[in-house]
Image (cartoon, helix red, strand yellow):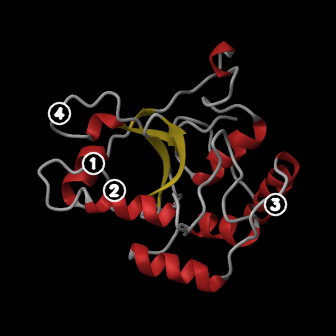
Amino acid sequence: MSAGSDSITVVTDIDDLVQRVAGRAASDNTGLPAPVGDARIAAAEAQLGFALHPLLARLYREVADGGFGPDYRLLPLLGPGPSVVGEYLTRREASVGVEHPQWPEGVVPILTWGCAMYAGVDCLHGDGQVLLFEPNPYRGGSWDQCWFLDSSSLAAWLETWLAGTGWFEEDAFDRDDLIEPRPWEQAARRLSSGA
């Protein structure tokens, strides 16, 4: 099973998935932050101006306030340092009213891959597709060439992490079945429309 958008549709029991993510998070990390309560989710959504994808909200509510997941691990939801809400608001502020917006509305950065690269969840997409923002191809003009579809859904992306089969795994490029992120076909429309 892979998380690419061409992958086989995976029917996942979300309750089971959240439990498996919680188990992996606990085994990978000592001292995980406590999960957040409903009030903190509501405060984050009020600042964002839209609801978090339901599965993403469950991860923060039932697993931990970030600190788990692939590579650099999920950002905390809110906070004085880098956070989902803080990173989103900073990127959106820089994208409003400019000729070439960089960050689309509704895509929350959930972790950094380093080198200004982010994984983001499209909270306006029913499945919560996971996107990769990779600014290195930028040569001026539109930012649409910097957006890639990593996974057609947050659930599939999490399954890939749990299985150790994501493109971000250390040995990923040694595998024949690797599906790398591909250009996000909706990037130009979403960046130009503001949604």
Q: In this rendered view, identify the residue nearer to me: 166 or 46.
A: 46
- Residue bearing mark 3: 16
Residue 81 to residue 162: above or below: below
Q: Is residue 192 left or right of residue 185?
A: left
The answer to whether any part of residue 92 appears in the image is yes
Specify which label sits upstream in the sequence, 2 or 3: 3
Q: Are marks 2 and 3 in contact (CB under 8 Å)?
A: no
Residue 119 to residue 13: above or below: above
Give me the disc on residue 102: 1
Is label 1 or label 2 in front?
2
- Disc 3/disc 4 C-alpha distance (Å): 44 Å
Q: Are marks 1 and 2 in contact (CB under 8 Å)?
A: yes
Q: Is residue 178 left or right of residue 16?
A: left
- Label 2: state its secondary structure: helix
- Residue bearing mark 4: 140
- Residue bearing mark 2: 91
* Amino acid type, residue under disc 1 in the picture: Gln
- Label 1: state its secondary structure: loop
* Amino acid type, residue under disc 3 in the picture: Asp
The answer to which quarter of the image holds residue 56 is bottom right
Q: Are marks 1 and 4 in contact (CB under 8 Å)?
A: no
- Disc 2/disc 3 C-alpha distance (Å): 33 Å
- Disc 1/disc 2 C-alpha distance (Å): 7 Å
Residue 124 in picture, x, y percent from top left: 42, 64
Q: Are marks 2 and 4 in contact (CB under 8 Å)?
A: no
